[in-house]
Amino acid sequence: MMRPLWTFFGLAFVVIGAIGLFLPFLPTVPFMLAAAFCFSQSSPRLHNWLLTHNIFGPPIHAWRERGAVPRRVKWISTLSSLAAPVISAILGFSTAVIAFQVICVIAVMAFIWTRPD
């Protein structure tokens, strides 16, 4: 009974993660990690597909094996995360919103940059 639900959430996470490839402030890897977990609970075929995918598979393996984030991904994450407060400032968002975004970016970047490469 739970397998279809796990599959649904896994597919939803894959879609959101794939969209994150094109949006600067939507991360891809955390959604793919969530999708891998969901597929491990529901579909060995989809789980295997995700783990062997040319783009999504290597970051999942790196995270599972070493808790690692490749340096290239760290830089891409940093630059794309900085886009959110910059875009907000250009659009005229309040200082409080921009400050909150900056605090979130700093916290996420601190986590990412303390992971092994």
Image (tube, rainbow, N blue to C red):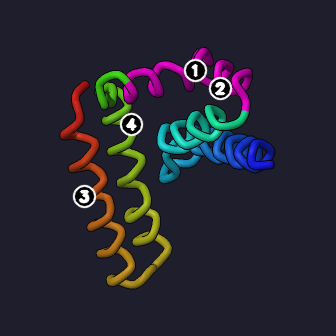
> Picture coordinates of residue 32 (x, y %)?
56, 37
**Disc 2 versus disc 3: distance between alpha carbons?**
32 Å
Query: Label 1 vs label 2: CA separation?
Result: 6 Å
Query: Mark 2 vs mark 3: which is more N-terminal?
Result: 2
Residue in the foreground of this view, choosing between 69 and 106? 69
Mark 4 or mark 2: which is in front?
Answer: 2
Q: Secondary structure at mark 3?
A: helix
Q: Quick check: marks 4 and 2 in contact, CB under 8 Å?
A: no
Report which quarter residue 79 is drawn in: top left
Q: Which comes before the other along the chain, label 1 or label 4?
A: 1
Q: Camera-side residue: 4 or 52?
A: 4
Query: Which quadrant holds the C terminus?
Result: top left
Is residue 117 inside the magenta stretch? no
Q: Nearer the viewer, residue 6 or 51?
A: 6
Q: CA distance from mark 1 to mark 4?
A: 22 Å
Q: Which mark is residue 51?
A: 1
**Which amino acid is tagged 2?**
His
Q: CA distance from mark 3 to mark 1?
A: 30 Å
- The region drawn magenta spans 43-64
Of the numbered discs 3 and 1, the one sitting upstream in the chain is: 1
Q: Are marks 4 and 3 in contact (CB under 8 Å)?
A: no
Q: Mark on residue 106?
A: 3
